[in-house]
Amino acid sequence: MSDVQIALTNTAGLSSVMSFWVFVAANGFSGLRGKLNSIGGWTMVVGFAALTIAIILRGVEAARFPLSNLYESLLWFAWAIMGGYIWINRAYGLGQLGWLSSMVAATMFLYGSWLPSNQHEITPLVPALVSYWRQIHVPPLIVSYAVFFLSGLCGLLQLWAAGRRQTVYSSVATIAACVAAIVLGTFSKVSVLWLQLLFVGGSALGMVISWLILKHVDEGRVNVERAGIYDDVSYRCVAIGFPLLTIGIITGGLWANHAWGSYWSWDPKESMALVTWLSYAAYIHLRIHRELSAEKLSLVAVVGLILTLLTYLGFNTLGFGGLHSYGQFK
Amino acid sequence: MSGDPSESRGNGKNTATVSFVASVKLTVLCLFFIGLTILIGAWCPQESQVGREKVFEAFGEQAAPVLIQLGASDIFHTPWFLFLIAMLTLNMVACSFQRVFPKIRSLKTPMPVLSGREIRRLPFNKSLVLPADRTVSATMDTIAASLSKRGFKVDRREDRLVAEYGKVGRLAATITHIGLLTLLGGVTITSWTGFSGFAPVRLGDSMSFAGSEHSKLWIGHLPEWKVRVLGTRRENYPTGEPKQWYSDLAVLDEKGKVLKTGQISVNNPLSYDGVDIYQASWGLAGVEIAFNGVKKELSLEPMGNRYASFLPLDPDSVLIFSVMDQTSPLRLFAKRTEWDAPKRLAEIKPGQSVDLGGVKLSFERVVPLTGLQYKSDPGIPVVYGAFAFIIVGVLLAMIPYRHVWAQAEIGKTDSGKNESGLKNQDATILYIGGRSQKARVGFERMLQSMLGRDFPEGREVEHEKGGEQLIGAAAGEPNDV
């Protein structure tokens, strides 16, 4: 890795941390909120630009498309989260989403920096990855995961604005348990069965509790207008992420058929991607059906976020194995 | 699987005609249980892919038999999963024909004209008092021009205007459902006529299709021709890691006549007569050596980056032959039980010999082995067509379907004072409103900003709050995804 590439990646990481604190500060100084949100947004733009150049440089240095291992995919994910937020911010101006998305981006940078050095280095591709299909199949998936994250974060904000604070606390605790399972799965030797139980059991229990306490409304803190905006943005993100996920899954099938003659083999990762696809298909149908309230749909978006987390990082870190082991490093 | 929005908005007539089989409720239930089942299948190693021993390896001697008994280790072939797929298929077929496909007709249906009162019930609506110096025609022209600039198709009439955007997006559900049904058709063709298999083939040997796998209900046929491996090699990175595997193949008929030749590598198959042959794996099968001119082939086993063969000489000693690839020298080691580590005896280049205490050991050659995966999938063109439909369908779903109505009517200004300073005077009121299921906030902001630019002098008429939402059918059902 060249020094310029390292410097640009670090700039992007620092920008995400700085923008997080600026957005947080905007909540503390209501008089300066507009200005601080604007500074936070521009800091994110700087980070996004630096990361864009860093990814391009990595590709030039490696003489291949720079998306072949977990570290590179984390860079792409952070890039998509930052870019997605910049796009949403331009259209809607959501400062609250700013600190959440910059926190996610910063977490991805941090997680990436903790990975073993061989992940950071540019290494040769295994034969299975030497294909033009790699650049067609993987980017839509990573971008869709990032957009689904934004949708889930908007879901949390919608619940908060709708006065469902207990549900938000429960959902955040659930997501924290899932993240803890992934971190432990990456950096510790805890049995994968316990970690799988923590992730899957914890998220199932957490989401059931969140659903049950959804009726508890803090009437004094309801902001109908903001809740409407977050609901709208959450749906918009799903409307963009769903086609990307579909394209990613289908191009994966085309690649698999081209490479080893089977477009579907129930590999754990592709099965999980299908589960995520089914969950968002259900979200869209529920949305059209309009039986569910915006709050319930927001909770479905949070469930989608957890499934996305499981698909993207969980299956590689919680010992599910399969053909998509390129994201593993143990 | 896509639902008609009017169904859930209390339209009793539609609710009555939509059966449970075609309902969105069944769709969501099927999606939930299929998702849950697949999740279990992804969590538990599947016997059909990795073998039963992996299930025991993952869950131990106590839990594994329970999971096997419950069907979790072969969940995609359980009656439960097949039942769920059948239910979803039934639901999709019923829903598609009952509600989704008929929507194609709605593309030709002109948008309804709404009165000012109806426009006021839209999610976004404004009632603006037109200044006396502004004619209705000029007002409508301005709105039409602004909406056209934003991509709306405008139907401009005397004192009213109807505009829509993204009508093609309404086809999203229809095209996606056509794609999903086509996919089912393609998968069925594959299941009834396709076959597949894997064969490790040594250099110079041939592969037939006799051991192919196919479904129980099968009406296809297996080819008579064979594939011979003329050459195979591994290409390495400078670090010694494999970069690519290549195999030169010849397709031979029953009499041995060459029908086609070609080189395959990972991601680059050879196709002949509807059968695709893939480079799936690569290795070294054995090493040919000679002891004092007597040839012998020893089987090789992978040992990290190298391959090795073990030749016991007596109960306490063994000869170890180690080789890295087809061109590298053969390393010869000896190991006795009392030694801590093997001792290196010699390194022999291909075609050369060494003397081992009166025994001449010759290294003839290494025999490589190529792993060939093959399949015949007559359903592929249909499946690819389905993929194309699905991708187009979901991309169309990104387009928001939007409506704008504008109507100029003479009415009371209701409250405040008009430009002549009189209260509750008759004046020309411009009713403008619209709706967008997706990107609603952006749509409303766009209209707000457009009105602010086009009618900076416009004063809004205040109405009483409340009022029911416009019925979707009357508004052209703009809720498709």
Image (cartoon, rainbow, N blue to C red):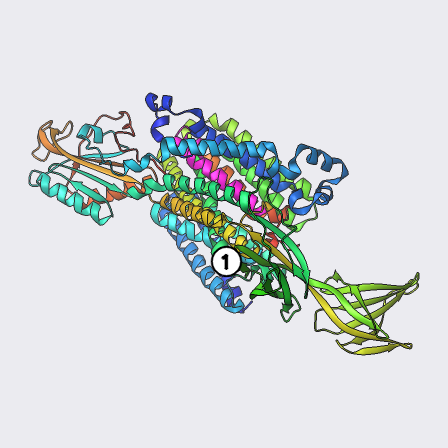
Instruction: From the top left corner, tell me how far across and down residue B405 is, in percent.
Output: 21, 36
Of B405 and A85, which appears nearest the observer?
A: B405
Chain under numbered label 1: A
Vertical side of B303 occupied by B471: above or below:
above
Of A285 and A93, which appears nearest the observer?
A: A285
Q: Write the start and end of the magenta stretch as one range.
A: A269-297
- The residue tagged 1 is A133
Q: What kind of secondary structure does the magenta stretch mostly adopt?
A: helix
Instruction: From the top left corner, tell me how far across and down residue A116 is, in percent.
Output: 63, 58
The residue sitting at 57% across, 34% down in the picture is B81
| SS category of the residue bearing label 1 | helix
Q: Is residue A326 magenta?
A: no
Instruction: From the top left corner, tell me how far across and down residue B265 is, in percent.
Output: 58, 63
Vertical side of A4 occupied by A157: above or below:
above
Tell me if I can see residue A216 in this picture.
no
Quadrant of the drawing holding the N terminus of chain A: bottom right
Q: Is residue A277 magenta?
A: yes
Tell me if I can see residue B5 in this picture.
yes
Q: Few, some or many C-alpha atoms within 10 Å of disc 1 (few <14, some 14-19, many ≥20)?
A: some
The residue sitting at 41% across, 29% down in the picture is A293
